[in-house]
Image (cartoon, grey):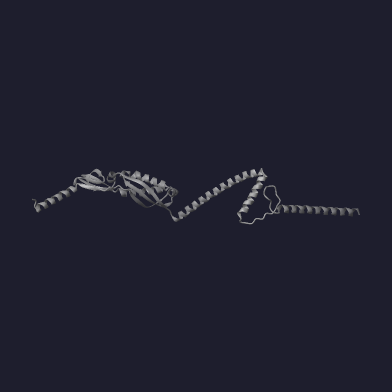
Amino acid sequence: MVSPMEFSFWMIGLLAIGSFMLRFFGICNEWDRKVLFTLGRFTRVVGPGLYFYVPLLQSPKRTVDVRIVTYTVPLQKGLTRDNIPVEVDAIVFYKVSNVKFAVLNVDDYNAATQMATRASIRDMVGKSNLDQLLSERDRVGDLIREHISDFVMQWGVTIISVEIKDVIVSRELEDAISREAAAEREKRARLKLAEAEELAADSMIKAAEKYAKSATSLQLRSMNMLYEMCMEGKSTMVFVPTVNTGHGMPSLIEVEGISKLVTQTQEQTQEQIRTRNWAQNDNFDSDQHT
């Protein structure tokens, strides 16, 4: 029969052995990767779950997070290619794709990637025009991503996306850009209006050629226009009979009557002048005979 002292001794021994054996095992989270070194040399990358290593000889010195990192880039100031000062606000998404390179080739892959991102954004601002930064953000973001990817690939980091959130310019430049955009829209509107006027003129010429061949068609068209004006119901129209000029549309009120009156008056005046002249000539001849 085991005495209480012997039982306590065995329990302490088992706990000591268990605690010593636990030092040979470790646990890695699902989103982490641990880098195992043996006597200071790289051995392997440990995946998620329970893993075995030999204490004193091996040690998991680094733990790398393989999830996507969202980095909000501080405002980067720079001059565009057309010498306009701007501030660029961007977001970068990246992750570690090669854990070995991320641990062995760079001291701090996060800091190095973020510094490379800021430098690439400033470099791309200097190579782009203001119009490109404002209207082609997706293309500029892709160019920045390609430039950063070539640089950080040696660190085992993959740049997923670079999103340009905003391009900030001064208030004076914003006013100038808005005026330029308004002028461009006004230009397009005037060009469209001129094209419409040209098309309308061509159509009117064709219609006039057709109406010239048929006076009845023009008369029917004029009657239809009068009918449409009457259907609007916004004003009162009084139709006054006028002389038909033969061109389809009624002539202006009393214009032809006035023209005839003026002609008749002129003829009467000339007739009176001729009559007076004749009378004077007759009187002169009679005086000479006397």
Q: Nearer the viewer, residue 132 or 208?
A: 208
Residue at (63% x, 51% y) in the render: 227
Residue 100 location (% of width, % of height): 27, 44
Residue 158: x %, y % from top left: 33, 45
Write the residue at 57% across / 47% down. Answer: 196
Q: Is residue 197 left or right of residue 275?
A: left
Number of numbered labels in the structure image = 0
**Looking at this rendering, what residue extends furthest in the front direction?**
1
Q: Position of residue 272 (x, y in %)?
A: 81, 54
Q: Residue at x 65, y 49 (%)?
A: 223
Residue 285 located left or right of residue 30? right
Q: Position of residue 226 (x, y in %)?
A: 64, 51
Residue nearer the viewer, 172 or 56 = 56
Between 138 and 274, the residue placed more toward the observer is 138
Q: Is residue 290 left or right of residue 72?
A: right
Report the quarter where the C terminus lies: bottom right
Q: Which residue is nearer to you in this view: 266 or 203?
A: 203
